[in-house]
Amino acid sequence: MILSDESIVKVLRIPYKPFSFLVNRIQCTSSVFVAETAPRTERFPWLTENLVVGPSEVPLFDLDGFLRHLFHVDADGAAHLAVMRDLNTFAPDVRDRCRGYGLEEDGAVGFRIPSATVMADMPLSRLRLCPGTTAGFLERKGILAVSVLDTDAMHYLIDLDILFSQEILETGKEGGR
Amino acid sequence: MDNAELLQRLKQPSTDDSQQAADETYRKYVVFSAGESTYALPAADVKEISFDNTIYFVPFTPPYIRGFANRHGQPYTVFDLELLFRNERMESGALLILNLPHDQASILITDVDEIIKVPAASVHSLTSDDEASRYFLESVTLGGKEVFVLNGARLLERLERDLER
C-alpha cells in the first residue's frame, strides 16, 4: 500500500548495515554528543551507563546495541551520539515503567545511536506500509512502515516509544537480553 | 486479404472457443525447487520470478518468515518453505513473487525447474486431511513423481494465526 501524500515527515536516519532506521523527529527532544559517560550503580539490560551533561547525569539507554540485537544488523561506524527525550513526553504507562528503573519523572533519558545519524526530510510517498498480513501486527510492535530510498534497499520506520516501552523496558523487567 | 476480411477473421469466435476449450483440458504450473523439495504453483498465482534479492530481516515474525524483500518499490514478505515444512533453513536470493489481490508475499526458492502445461488428467485431488496437506491444492504427476501444488492463501492464513498468538 502506498501512502500517496506529498507531505514531508522529518526523520532521523540511523544507519546500519544492511539497512537503516527512520525515527520521527517528534520523538526526539534534542541530540547531543556522548563526550563523557559514567557507569551506573544499578544496571539493567540496555541501561548500564549515564550520560554526563554538565553537572548532571542522564540515564543513557543503549539503543544502538538494542537495534543491532533485535534486527540482526551490523554497526556502520561508532555510536557517540545520543538523542534525548524528556520523560514527561512519554505516555503515562511508559512513565510508570520508567519509575521501575528508578528514573525521575521530571527528568530526561538519552538513547545512544550511531554518530553517522542524520536528519532527513522523508516524503510520505517514499514510505510503504508493511505487507498486508504483517502490517497491523508489526505496527503494534513498533515497526510502522518501510521506506524505499534505493532500488533494492529497504529501511524501517520505527516507533521509538513503542520499542522503548514494549521491548527495552520489558527486557529489563524480565531480566533477559 | 483486405482489412474487412482481416477484421472478420479476427472477430470469428469459433477458433478462440476451440483454443479455449483446448486450454481448459490443460493446466499450467510453475515447478520450482526449495532446498531438497520440489513444489508447483498454478502459473496464475505467480507474478514474477526474481533472482539476486536481498532479504531484510524482520523481528517478531515466525522463523519461516525470513524477512522482507523490495521488489519495484514494494515490500514483500518472504516465506521459507523448508523452514516451514522441514525445519531446515534455505540460503538463496531467488524468489517467486506471488500474485495476491490483498497482500504482498513471496516464496524463497532454489530455482525454477520448469513451467509446464499438463493435461487435467495428470492433476490429482488430495484425499489426505492432515496438517501438511492443508497447504496444498492438488498434486501433479511429473516424470512418474507426484509434485504437490502449493496453496498460497494457506501460507498467509498460517502467518496470520501465528502472529495472533
Image (cartoon, rainbow, N blue to C red):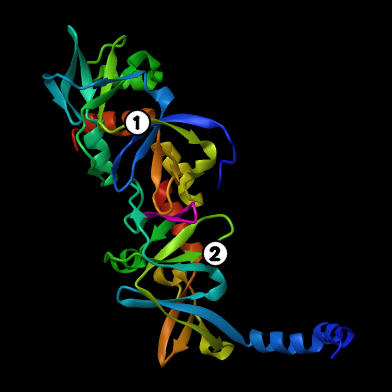
The residue located at (52%, 31%) in the rendering is A8
User: Magenta stretch containing residue A29, yes or no?
Assistant: no
| Residue lying at the far bottom of the rendered structure | B144
- For disc 2, the marked residue is B99
- The segment highlighted magenta reads B67-76
Residue A53 in the image: state x and y as whole percent.
Answer: 20, 12
Locate residue A15: give its quadrant.
top left
- Three-letter code, disc 1: Val
Structural crowding at the residue carrying mark 1, measured as other residues with C-alpha within 10 Å and reported as few (<14), some (14–19) or many (≥20): few
| Residue lying at the far front of the rendered structure | B2
**Could you tell me how far apart the alpha carbons at marks 2 and 1 are, in whole angstroms?**
38 Å
Q: Secondary structure at mark 2?
A: loop
Viewer-proximal residue, B149 or B72?
B72
User: Numbered disc 2: what chain?
Assistant: B
Q: Is residue B122 left or right of residue A170?
A: right
The residue located at (30%, 69%) in the rendering is B86
